[in-house]
C-alpha cells in the first residue's frame, strides 16, 4: 500500500488540496510547527533543507545543456532499460500531460521524455537533463527525497520546499542493483499538480521493481556465462589454485574454496588487485565481465587459436577447441593480426583492413564485437593476438597444405598482399 508515501488520494480535488497545503507551507515558513496535514516525511525533508541553509526561492542547479548528461547516460546501468522505461512510463506520461525522467544515484537528471508542452514547462524550472535534483540542491522533491529515504515517494504542490515548484507534482522511486545492493538511480513521473494521481506513484514504484527484476535476471545470466567459461578454461588446464571473480570483486567460484575469501579489491582500472599473500595471474573473461585469477605458478598458458582461411570466403576459427563463426570483416581482422604477431596500432590496422583511414570508432567497434567471440586471446594497445596461433596461411614451408587462395572474396590490403605472396611458387634450391 502507498500509505503516507503517496501524496494524493482518488477523489480528492487537487486544487483544494493544493490550497490547504499552501496555507500550511506559509505557516511553516513563518516559523510555526508544520500542520498535521503535512506528512511527516515532508516535514522531515523541510527540516533537512532548512538545516542545509537552502533558500525557498530559486530552482535546481543545471550543470550543462544535456550533452554531458547524455554521455553519462550511455555509461549508466539504467541506459539498458530505456526501452522498458518508455513502454511503462512515456505513453502514460504523454496521455496524462506529464514527463518521465531518469536520474543517477546523486539526483542528476540524465533523461526526460513525455508530453511536449510539459517538457517545455519543465525546462523553465530545470527539470531536465543536466540538472541536479538532489534534495540538498533542489529541496524537497520526488527524485531527491526518494533517494534520501531510499523508497518511492510522491511530492505534491506546496509539499515542495521551493515555491516555484508548487505548481508541480511528481513521484519517484529509487532503483537498486540487486546484484551489488548499490543504488544506481531513480525513475520518476512529473507534471502540473492538477494532473496528479495516486496511480503515478504506483506506476513508478512498479517500474523500478520491474527494472530491478530485469537487472537480477541479467546478473544471473552473467554469472552463469562466466562460470561456464571459468570451468571450460580451468578444468582441462590446471589443478592449481584458481578463482572466478566478477567485475565488482566478488569471488563467484574458487578452488580451493577459501583461497581468496569472498571478495577481492578492484583497482582503478577495473582489474582485480592481487591478494597480499600470493601473486596471481589475472585474465579477463567475456570482455571484462569477470576475471580468472590463478596462482602465477599455475597460470594457464596462452589459448590455442587455430585459423583456417585458405579456399574459403570466410575464415573458420577455433579457440581451445571451441569453433567460432566469423564474418568476412572479422576474418580479415584476424588474418591481419595473425600476420603481425607484434601487434598493430589503430591506424595501421585500419590501413591493413580498410586500405584507407577510417574513424577510430569504426575500428574499435569491430574489435569490440570480435573480442566478444574471441575472448582474451585478442588484446588492445596495440591490437594483437595473445595466443598460440596456428593458421593454414602461415605454413609457408608446407605448400602441400595450401587448399586454395587466402580469403578470395576479400579486398583488404593485408589479405591481398598475403594472398599474392602465397601464390608465388616456392624458391628453388640452388
Image (tube, grey):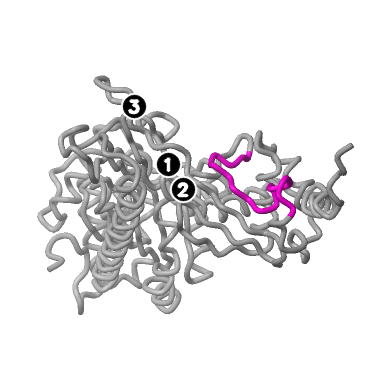
On the picture, is 393 further left or further right than 29?
right
Residue 240 at x, y percent in the picture = 26, 35
Tell me if I can see residue 157 in this picture: no
Camera-nearest residue between 261 and 283: 283
Residue at point 20%, 45% (across, down): 28
Q: Secondary structure at mark 2?
A: helix
Q: Secondary structure at mark 1?
A: strand
343, above or below 10, in the image? above
Quick check: is 161 in the magenta stretch? no
Give the magenta-colored segment's residue range: 383-399
Choose the circle earlier in sequence order: 3 or 2. Answer: 2
Q: Which mark is residue 83?
A: none
Cα separation, mark 2 vs mark 1, equals 7 Å
Q: Which residue is mark 2?
A: 287
Tell me if I can see residue 311 in this picture: yes
Residue 324 at x, y percent in the picture = 52, 61
Query: Residue 175 occupies which quadrant of the picture?
Result: bottom left
Q: Residue furthest left?
A: 36
Number of marks drawn:
3
Query: Is the residue under label 1 in contact with that under label 2 (CB below 8 Å)?
Result: yes
Cα separation, mark 1 vs mark 3, equals 18 Å
Q: Which residue is mark 3?
A: 297
Residue at point 41%, 72% (across, down): 93
Residue 330 at x, y percent in the picture = 64, 57
How packed is label 1: few (under 14 Cα within 10 Å), some, or many (20 or more)? many
Residue at point 23%, 45% (across, down): 253
Q: Which mark is residue 284?
A: 1
Amino acid at each position: 500500500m502507498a500509505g503516507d508515501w503517496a501524496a494524493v488520494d482518488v477523489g480528492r480535488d487537487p486544487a483544494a488540496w493544493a490550497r490547504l497545503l499552501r496555507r500550511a507551507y506559509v505557516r511553516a515558513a513563518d516559523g510555526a510547527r508544520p500542520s498535521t496535514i503535512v506528512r511527516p516525511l515532508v516535514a522531515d525533508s523541510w527540516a533537512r533543507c532548512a538545516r542545509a541553509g537552502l533558500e525557498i526561492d530559486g530552482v535546481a542547479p543545471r550543470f550543462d545543456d544535456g550533452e554531458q548528461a547524455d554521455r553519462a547516460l550511455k555509461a549508466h546501468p539504467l541506459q539498458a532499460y530505456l526501452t522498458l522505461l518508455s513502454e511503462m512510463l512515456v505513453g502514460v506520461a504523454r496521455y496524462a500531460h506529464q514527463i518521465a525522467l531518469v536520474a543517477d544515484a546523486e539526483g542528476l537528471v540524465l533523461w526526460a521524455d513525455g508530453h511536449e508542452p510539459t517538457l517545455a514547462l519543465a525546462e523553465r524550472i530545470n527539470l531536465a537533463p543536466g540538472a541536479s535534483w538532489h534534495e540538498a540542491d533542489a529541496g524537497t522533491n520526488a527524485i531527491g527525497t526518494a533517494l534520501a529515504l531510499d523508497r518511492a515517494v510522491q511530492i505534491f504542490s506546496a509539499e515542495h520546499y521551493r515555491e516555484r515548484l508548487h505548481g508541480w507534482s511528481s513521484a519517484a522511486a529509487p532503483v537498486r542493483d540487486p546484484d551489488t545492493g548499490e543504488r544506481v538511480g531513480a525513475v520518476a513521473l512529473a507534471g502540473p499538480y492538477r494532473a496528479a494521481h495516486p496511480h503515478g506513484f504506483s506506476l513508478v514504484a512498479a517500474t523500478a521493481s520491474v527494472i530491478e527484476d530485469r537487472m537480477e535476471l541479467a546478473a544471473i545470466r552473467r554469472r552463469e556465462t562466466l562460470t561456464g567459461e571459468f570451468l571450460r578454461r580451468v578444468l582441462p588446464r590446471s589443478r592449481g589454485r584458481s578463482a572466478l571473480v566478477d567485475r565488482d570483486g566478488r569471488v563467484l567460484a574458487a578452488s580451493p574454496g577459501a583461497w581468496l575469501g569472498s571478495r577481492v579489491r578492484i583497482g582503478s582500472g577495473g582489474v582485480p588487485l592481487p591478494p597480499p599473500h600470493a601473486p596471481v595471474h589475472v585474465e579477463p573473461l567475456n570482455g571484462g565481465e569477470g576475471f580468472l585469477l590463478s596462482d602465477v605458478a599455475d597460470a594457464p598458458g596462452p589459448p590455442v587459436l587455430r585459423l583456417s582461411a585458405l579456399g574459403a570466403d570466410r575464415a573458420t576459427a577455433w579457440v581451445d577447441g571451441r569453433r567460432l563463426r566469423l564474418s568476412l570483416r572479422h576474418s580479415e581482422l584476424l588474418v591481419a593480426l595473425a600476420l603481425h604477431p607484434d601487434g598493430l596500432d589503430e591506424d595501421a590496422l585500419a590501413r591493413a583492413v580498410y586500405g584507407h583511414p577510417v574513424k577510430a570508432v569504426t575500428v574499435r567497434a569491430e574489435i569490440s564485437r570480435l573480442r566478444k567471440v574471441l575472448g582474451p586471446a585478442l588484446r588492445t594497445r596495440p591490437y594483437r593476438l595473445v595466443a598460440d596461433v596456428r593458421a593454414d596461411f602461415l605454413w609457408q614451408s608446407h605448400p602441400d597444405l595450401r587448399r586454395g587462395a587466402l580469403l578470395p572474396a576479400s579486398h583488404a590490403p593485408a589479405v591481398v598482399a598475403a594472398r599474392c605472396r602465397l601464390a608465388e611458387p616456392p624458391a628453388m634450391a640452388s
